[in-house]
Image (cartoon, rainbow, N blue to C red):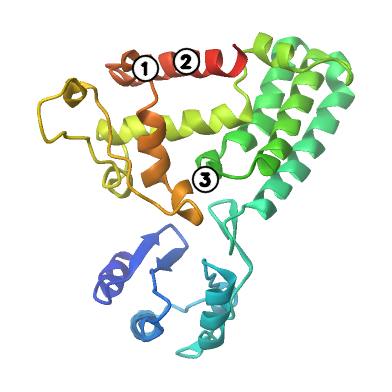
Amino acid sequence: YMLPLGNIIRNHSINFHCYADDTQLYLSIKPDETNQLAKLQACLKDIKTWMSSNFLMLNTDKTEVIILGPKRLRNAFSNDIEALDGINLASSTTVRNLGVIFDQDLSFNSHIKQISRTAFFHLRNIAKIRHILSQNDAEKLVHAFVTSRLDYCNSLLSGCPKKSLKTLQLIQNAAARVLTRTRKWDHITPVLAALHWLPVKYRIEFKILLLTYKSIKGQAPAYLKDLIVPYKPTRALRSQTAGLLVVPRVSKSTMGARAFSYQAPLQWNQLPVCVREADTLSTFKSRLKTFLFDKAYS
């Protein structure tokens, strides 16, 4: 019974996502708009009132807040966020969101470290029993316990530093060695190519472009579709029918260059026409993997 909760939050013009047992509120605040916190306070007050009248209780122990932005501005807002309507909202440095660990710098370093710890734990266990596993069974275990973690929400890592992606690539390399019983001093690139595995960097590109295709075809959520703008030249050009997208101007010194609204059209426009014009999702995925595979190993 959470349907009325959405209407309460909408009345305060605050963005939100509702899940089975979790509700997330988020709003964008400019440095000089600390008064926006009053809007959040009023929203929380109305939520508490509604919950009390329906014999529900807000779990204050699990209520978290994270401030994303430059450190100087984060510190300024942290001083203003101590308690809103009696709820302790001390700013957290990391929060878990649908299994992904977000940090205040959006570096995802904590998330990558968690993936690394978990993946290597499973790889060590698989390595112990590799000699009694068939190739097919070993591959299933690697994909279930390792590859799935590398791919989960990996589009968030688009634009991350090479150092961060290198950590994930080491996991994939180790998985390939365990699966194929390749010695640690042997070159791994030919092994990855033989397995038809895209490197981590290109797996991220694959996910971004897959979401872009779904957005264009109306198969993605509205909050993604609204970020995709088809390119319409001011005069008749061949590019008018090329399926290009508008690449927004962003400050590359900030997080703007990592946003989906920037990365999606940027990478989409670099695809061959035959990939962009794929009629079905399965055809697009097949052509896209072939393109990225050639790009990675040629």
Q: Amino acid at mark 2?
A: Phe
Decide which of 251, 53 is in the foreground and name it: 251
Q: Please tell me whether residue 277 is drawn above or below residue 49 in the rendered image.
A: above
- Give the residue drawn at x 61%, y 14%: 297
Question: Which residue corresponds to mark 1?
Answer: 272
Q: Amino acid at mark 3?
A: Leu
Question: Which residue corresponds to mark 3?
Answer: 156
First-in-chain label (1 vs 3): 3
Q: Given contact means CB atoms under 8 Å apart, are the residues at marks 1 and 2 in contact?
A: yes
Q: Please tell me whether residue 227 is drawn above or below residue 292 in the rendered image.
A: below
* Relative horizontal placement of residue 292, taking residue 250 as reference (left or right): right
- Give the residue drawn at x 89%, y 19%: 185
**Separation of residues labelled 3 and 2 (CA atoms):** 22 Å
Residue 30: where, in percent of width, then height? 39, 74
How many neighbours does mark 3 have within 10 angstroms: few (below 14), some (14-19), or many (20 or more)?
some
- Give the residue drawn at x 24%, y 26%: 243
